[in-house]
């Protein structure tokens, strides 16, 4: 029987001890004892489904999280990591070697660009960056030498929505893997695997935890990829998730859909309200009909997500606006239960050269707004009052 995502988020992957506890247990151990020397030898030769060797390789609590998030995503398996960037680096490094070619969308989080252009390039991987919205650019860049393609399903922070099915078809035509950072789509609205993605990456720090408590990430895909390619690399390089953080993520998954759907509902209402402000140069939200990829967003997700971008015209006005907010917090995280505003040009994307910021549309007045769980009425009042206080540019 096929289970709904809300049911899987509560029950998938559950392991109970002999005490039959209701709330999932935290197995706070880094090592495991064996009944005999022969048992230890056998486990190192081939560990069974519920047999563990060392927490860097796997742990019962971590395994619960991996199986539950894999079930939500519709993936065969997953490997949990210490952070979202550990997942990005782990996947890209495990799946490439010197001489391989990677094609990636240019609109990426700054740390992702660093992994591609500095880390992978340092080890002999050739990287080509393209305009993620330009299918002809993808077609020309992807060659028989291409090992994988990488992109954010919704880019950070300008919220471009990439056609997953088209890019996947181009990559698979030459035998390349498709790896997608799916944070802005969330497991609630994701259809990435159905659309052709081979490997899905999440920063669990964002919506999955959703409460600003801990770091985490996960790499999802087929068993062959996760256990054959990802696991050997990750268990030897040390990017594993801690049991305590895995327990937090397991418990957070129980409310993920309720939280994210409430945030999306509020984000839609706020985006519509902000469209009427004459003092905003841009309101970018994939759930608005004014968004260039609105139709694609509806086909791929059915919703616009929890994040929008606002352009108030200048850095000076952006700072006045941010400083006038009373409910919405200034921070560089997103996907939290608390609403968060960020000025990418001076924080998350500060180190990008100005020419690259210009190319990506990261202007001095651009703000990334992650919608939380507060009252939509209160958030709207906070936004409007802060915009009024920021004034109109002369």
Image (cartoon, rainbow, N blue to C red):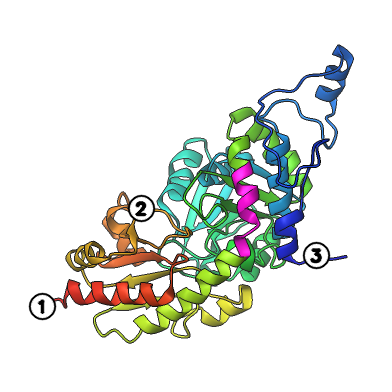
Query: Is the residue marked by circle 1 packed among few (<14), some (14-19), or many (20+) residues within 10 Å?
Result: few
Q: CA distance from mark 3 to mark 1?
A: 57 Å
Question: In the rendered view, does 78 fall on the left or right side of 135?
Answer: right
The secondary structure making up most of the magenta span is helix
Please say whether residue 109 is visible from this viewpoint.
Answer: yes
Mark 3 against mark 2, which lies toward the viewer? 3
Q: Nearer the viewer, residue 291 or 253?
A: 253
Q: Is residue 71 above or below residue 87?
A: below
Query: Is the residue marked by circle 3 packed among few (<14), some (14-19), or many (20+) residues within 10 Å?
Result: few
Question: In the rendered view, does 185 fall on the left or right side of 284?
Answer: right
Q: Residue at x 45, y 65 (%)?
A: 372
Q: Residue at x 52, y 55 (%)?
A: 210
In the rendered image, residue 183 lying in the magenta stretch gets the answer no
For mark 1, give the secondary structure: loop
For mark 3, give the secondary structure: loop
Which mark sits nearer the N-terminus, 2 or 1?
2
Query: Is the residue marked by circle 2 packed among few (<14), some (14-19), or many (20+) residues within 10 Å?
Result: some
Q: Indicate which disc residue 394 carries.
A: 1
State the quadrant of the N terminus: bottom right
Q: Are marks 3 and 2 in contact (CB under 8 Å)?
A: no
Judging by the rendered image, the residue that carries numbered circle 3 is 3
Q: Are marks 3 and 1 in contact (CB under 8 Å)?
A: no
Which mark sits nearer the N-terminus, 3 or 2?
3
Q: Is residue 198 above or below residue 226?
A: below
Q: Residue at x 47, y 63 (%)?
A: 155
Residue 196: x and y in percent read 70, 64
Q: CA distance from mark 3 to mark 2?
A: 38 Å
Instruction: Tell me where the magenta segment starts and ends, as one range.
Output: 247-257
Judging by the rendered image, the residue that carries numbered circle 2 is 348
């Amino acid at each position: 029987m096929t289970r709904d995502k809300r049911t899987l988020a509560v029950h998938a992957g559950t392991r109970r001890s002999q005490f039959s506890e209701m709330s999932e247990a935290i197995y706070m151990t880094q090592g495991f004892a064996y009944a005999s020397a022969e048992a230890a030898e056998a486990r190192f030769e081939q560990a069974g489904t519920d047999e563990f060797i060392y927490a860097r390789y796997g742990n019962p609590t971590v395994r619960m999280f991996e199986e539950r998030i894999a079930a939500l995503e519709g993936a065969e398996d997953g490997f949990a990591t210490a952070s979202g960037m550990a997942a990005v680096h782990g996947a890209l490094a495990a799946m490439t070697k010197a001489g391989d070619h990677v094609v990636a969308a240019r609109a990426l989080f700054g740390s992702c660009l660093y992994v591609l252009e500095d880390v992978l390039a340092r080890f002999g991987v050739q990287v080509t960056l393209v305009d993620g919205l330009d299918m002809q650019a993808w077609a020309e860049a992807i060659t028989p030498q291409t090992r994988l393609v990488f992109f954010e399903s919704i880019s950070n922070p300008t919220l471009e929505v990439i056609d997953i099915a088209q890019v996947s078809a181009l990559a698979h035509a030459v035998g390349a893997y498709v790896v997608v950072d799916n944070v802005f789509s969330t497991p609630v609205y994701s259809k990435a695997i159905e659309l052709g993605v081979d490997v899905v990456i999440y920063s669990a720090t964002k919506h999955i935890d959703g409460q600003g408590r801990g770091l985490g990430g996960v790499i999802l895909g087929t068993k062959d990829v996760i256990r054959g390619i990802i696991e050997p690399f990750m268990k030897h390089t040390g990017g594993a998730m801690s049991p305590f953080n895995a327990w937090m993520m397991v418990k957070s998954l129980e409310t993920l859909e309720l939280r994210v759907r409430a945030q999306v509902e509020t984000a839609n209402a706020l985006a519509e309200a902000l469209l009427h402000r004459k003092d905003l140069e841009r309101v970018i939200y994939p759930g608005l009909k004014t968004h260039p990829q609105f139709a694609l967003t509806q086909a791929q997700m059915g919703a616009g997500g929890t994040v929008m971008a606002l352009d108030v015209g200048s850095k000076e006005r952006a700072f006045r606006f941010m400083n006038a907010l009373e409910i919405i917090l200034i921070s560089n995280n997103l996907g939290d239960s608390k609403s968060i505003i960020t000025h990418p040009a001076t924080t998350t994307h500060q180190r990008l050269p100005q020419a690259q910021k210009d190319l990506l549309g990261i202007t001095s007045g651009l703000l990334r707004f992650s919608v939380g769980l507060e009252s939509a009425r209160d958030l709207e009042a906070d936004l409007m009052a802060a915009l009024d206080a920021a004034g109109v540019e002369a």
